[in-house]
Image (cartoon, helix red, strand yellow):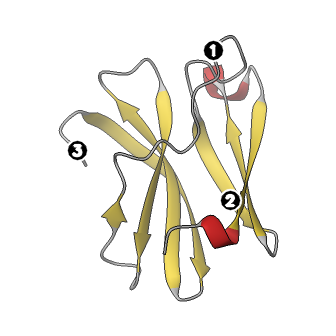
Amino acid sequence: MEPFEALVSKPSVLLIDGVYHMWFSVFAMSDVGYRLGYARSRDGINWERFHDREIIPLSPGEFDSKNQSYPFVVDMGSQLWMFYTGDEFGATGIGLATLDKDKLSR
């Protein structure tokens, strides 16, 4: 955990082509709410986190303008679908983000 983080929770892990991919919620003391994080591993024990990658940008004036949390990722064949909650832990809505698997970091 980075020094500025107060909490990391709710991981969603998929094994794709021999690589584990994990998405999770991160609460940083300097931010207003939770953000989404990403890490990967070849063995499921040692993880490489990508702190500098924004998973999904916040949407000013929308349901996820301050908070993105509780990711759940589903393998849909050639795509990954991520369901996640917006502000107030889903009271303002649930989002769906998609990613073509061939664009996934390996």
Q: Is residue 56 left or right of residue 81?
A: left
Residue farthest bottom in this picture:
18
Alpha carbon distance from label 3 to label 1: 26 Å
Identify the residue at image location x=63%, y=15%: 60
* SS state under label 2: strand
- In the image, residue 5 above or below residue 71: above
Q: Position of residue 98 (x, y in %)?
A: 75, 53
Q: Which mark is residue 60?
A: 1
Q: Earlier in the sequence, mark 3 or mark 1?
A: 3
Q: Position of residue 100 (x, y in %)?
A: 72, 64
Pointer 1 local density, CA inside 10 Å: few below 14, some 14–19, many at least 20: few
Q: Quadrant of residue 48?
A: bottom left
Q: Amino acid at mark 3?
A: Glu
Identify the residue at image location x=52%, y=69%: 21
Q: Amino acid at mark 2?
A: Val
Q: Amino acid at mark 1?
A: Pro
Q: Quadrant of residue 42?
A: bottom left
Q: Position of residue 72 (x, y in %)?
A: 67, 54
Q: Nearer the viewer, mark 1 or mark 2?
A: 1
Q: Earlier in the sequence, mark 1 or mark 2?
A: 1
- In the image, residue 69 above or below residue 38: above
Q: Which mark is residue 2?
A: 3
The answer to whether the residue labelled 1 contacts the one labelled 2, judged by CB atoms less than 8 Å apart, is no
- In the image, residue 18 above or below residue 99: below
Looking at this view, is 5 or 60 the one in front? 60
Q: Which mark is residue 73?
A: 2
Pointer 2 local density, CA inside 10 Å: few below 14, some 14–19, many at least 20: many
* SS state under label 1: loop
Q: Quadrant of residue 90?
A: top right
Alpha carbon distance from label 2 to label 3: 24 Å
Looking at this view, is 57 or 46 the one in front? 57
